[in-house]
Structures are given as C-alpha cells and as structure tokens.
Amino acid sequence: MHAQHFRGGVHPPDYKVFSRSVPISVVPAPNKVRVPLAQHLGVPAQALVKKGDRVCVGQPIGACVGFVSAAVHAPVAGTVTATPDVNLHTNRVVPGIEIENDTSDTLFAGVAPVTTVDRAAIIKAVQAAGIVGLGGATFPSHVKLQPPADKKISTLIINAAECEPFLTCDYRLVLEDGERVVRGAALMMTALDVHACIIAIEDNKPDAAQHLRALLGARADMRVATLPTHYPQGGEKQLICALTGREVPSGGLPMDVGCVVHNVGTAAAVTDAVERGMPLIERIVTVSGDAVERPGNYRVRLGTPIRAVLAAAGCDIERCAKVVIGGPMTGATATDLDAPVIKGTSGILAFSAAWVNADQPRPCIRCGRCGTVCPIGLQPTQLEALANLRDVNALQAQYAADCIECGCCAYICPARRALVQGIRYGKAQITALRKAVKN
C-alpha cells in the first residue's frame, strides 16, 4: 500500500547516511545515574525510595500519580545517594533520584512475565512498566490504550515513519528487532480490541519495509504502508490523514476519528513489559552530527548524562557549537550536557560552528511560504505577531493551539524568524488563560 499525501510539509535533507548503516551498540551504564521523576507528559511520579536505600534493576522508584502519569524505575542496581532536583536538557528542573551503580545489574525480584495475557493484564503491565510514547511525545501509553467508551477505535497505527533528519533509531530497531515490534503491536491490538493495524514507514527505508512485510507473512489483520518521504510525515495527524483520509478535528485527538497511534519503540517496550515484565529503563538513541566521530545508534540507560553518551560516540565537546536533543526540526538545544537521557530522548546531535546557522532574524517579508508549508493550514507569521502582542483572544480565533510545532515554517522562512518559539509562547498564553478561567 502506498499512502496518499497530506497537505503542506517540507523536504529537508535527511542526513540519515551518517548512522543508518551502523548496528545498535550499547553505552555502558555510568557510575552514577540521575533519574528524573518527570520524564513524561502529565503529573510527575512520586518518589518511592529515599537516600540510603538499595535498589535493583527494574525496581519501581517513582509511582504514578493519577491517571495521566508514568511510573519510573531504577536503570541500574546500587544505592540511592540523593533525591535531588534534576536539571533537564531544556533547563527545566524536576525532582529526581540519584543512584550509585554497583555494576552488579541485579534484577528486581518483581520483574516477571504476565501469565494470563488479556486486555486488562496488558494495560496493567504497560502502566506498571512506565511506558510512554518513545517517538518524543512521552504521553503515557496506558492512557492511549484506554479510550473512553464512546470513542470506538477501528485502527491501530504503528509509527515507523521517522521523518526527522538524522534520526535512525527506529529504523535500526525495525531491522534488528522487528519481531518485538510486531509482537508489541499485536498486544496493543488486543488491549484496544481492534482488528486492523497499519505499520507506517517512509519509502526511503525500503529494506525495513520489506523486513516488516516478511515478519507479518500472511497476517490479514496487520499490514505495512509505505509513505512518501515528506516531513512531517510522522506526525500523528499527518499519518492518520495519509493512511485513512480522516482528518482529526481542531482541538481533537486521533481517537476522535477511530485511530490510536503508537511509536515502534513503544511497541517493542510493550513486548518487554508483557513477555518479560521488564519496565522501561533504557532506550535507543541516535547520536550524530559533524562533531561526532562515531555516529550511530546506541542503547542507553535512562539517567545517563548526555555528556557520557557523546563521549561514547567519540564526540569532541570542544568542537561543539550546539547540541540538539531530538531531531533538528522539533528538538531542543541542550543547555546542560550533564542533564540525563530520559524516555523521550530519541537523538543527540552535536554540531560544529560550520553547521550552525547563526543568521539573525529579519523582519517578515510577507512571502506567505510559512502558511503554504504548514501541515495544519495555519498562518504562522500572523500567530507569531499575535503572540508578541499577547492577543490571546485572537490567538484562539486563529487556532494557535492546533500548531504541532513541527518547524516547517521556521525551516522555510527566508527571514529566519523564530516562528515556532513565537507560536509556542502564544500557546502558553492560551493555556494560562484557560487555567485562570477554570480556577
């Protein structure tokens, strides 16, 4: 199946050649990890351990607080040395747990496979494992597996598009461990009680698509859809539109059109949770950029300092003019290289000054390109201006909250305006107003 096209979007160079052919390798667990209790959208986890406690690999150290939250587990065995505030790469400070690694990797006694695999058991295992969206959104996965009774889900979509430049961690996962992805997708189908699953992948990864088709064999309830290589093909709303022709309404969610979307890494993590009882304590991270000597895909324990991952990939920190966490279109510049790898860290990109665009933003020339490429159909330059004016009512009227912050507008802008940051500022104003009205 070859999918149809969604509106807008751009064609940035993919720069995947640096890491796509490099098999996944392991970054050794560091001597000390700092594990944030807020690695997900929703309420931060509540600490279950204190200074001086001994913990084992996979032991719960942070409990869910409410429905939209995610548990946190020890990525190493050792002693809790502190419960400090942890500085994330975005400069956000959150509570955390610091563990000194005793290098024994002793597994927590409570790690055990699910014995009776049914809908309730799968959802319970996913929640207990602290699984979140590993494509970067980090929304707690158990919530998406429990749509409201009035939202009838017909289709599960497994997102293997990986449209961000440089990133190849999902691609390597599919090639090297595609069976885990397929088994996890089947488990999520059971949890959602659906009988149709589409694994969506861009057509610049033909070997991965072929491998998935071979794994599916004659299955009638699962299929692989090849998508045109076009950014932001991997966005939830764009995937749904391209694969089903359905358009998620303004302010709506995929479940409003009968779909649930999960990342391939999330599917593999669901397999681990159900078949082994293993919680989410590590993830695959693409490390790339011109300042990296050994670009590739690395399996990294959560809580490992970004600096340690860069060192493992042979990065010359002195050459780095910028380190981006995630992809270059939607990622954030790292403000602290001692910040830890977290559940949403899909990439660590290190660039020298030669690769960093230092152009200063100039006045808007009203060319209209940002509106043309916006996959949501917004007018980014107008939204930026309204955000600067703090005109919240106008921002709402212009559907600013629907912006997916894909970065297409900033990429295409000849005036180099920081449109995404401006719109994000406007969205924050809308959120603050809604909270004020609610209270």
Image (cartoon, rainbow, N blue to C red):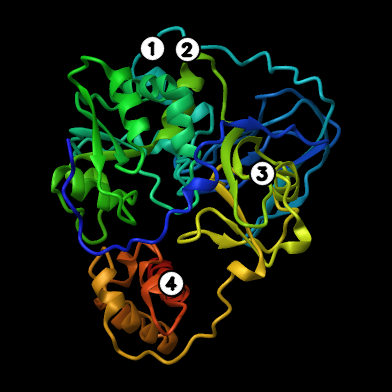
Asked if disc 2 and disc 1 are in contact, CB closer than 8 Å, the reply is yes
- Going by the numbered disc 1, the residue's amino acid type is Val
Mark closer to the observer (4, 2)? 4
Q: Residues within 10 Å of mark 2 (few under 14, many from 20)?
A: some
Q: Which mark is residue 114?
A: 2
Q: CA distance from mark 3 to mark 1?
A: 41 Å
Number of numbered discs overlaid on the protein picture: 4
- Going by the numbered disc 3, the residue's amino acid type is Arg
**Disc 1 secondary structure class:** loop
Q: CA distance from mark 2 to mark 3?
A: 39 Å
Residue 157 spot, x, y in % from top left: 28, 36
Mark closer to the observer (2, 3)? 3
Q: Is residue 255 left or right of residue 99?
A: left
Q: Which callout, 3 or 1, points at the residue further toward the start of the chain?
A: 1
- Work out whether 191 lies above or below 13: above
In front of the other: 195 or 430? 195
Q: Name the residue rendered at 28%, 86% in the picture.
A: 367
Residue 286 spot, x, y in % from top left: 56, 44
Q: Which callout, 2 or 3, points at the residue further toward the start of the chain?
A: 2
**Disc 3 secondary structure class:** loop
For disc 3, the marked residue is 294
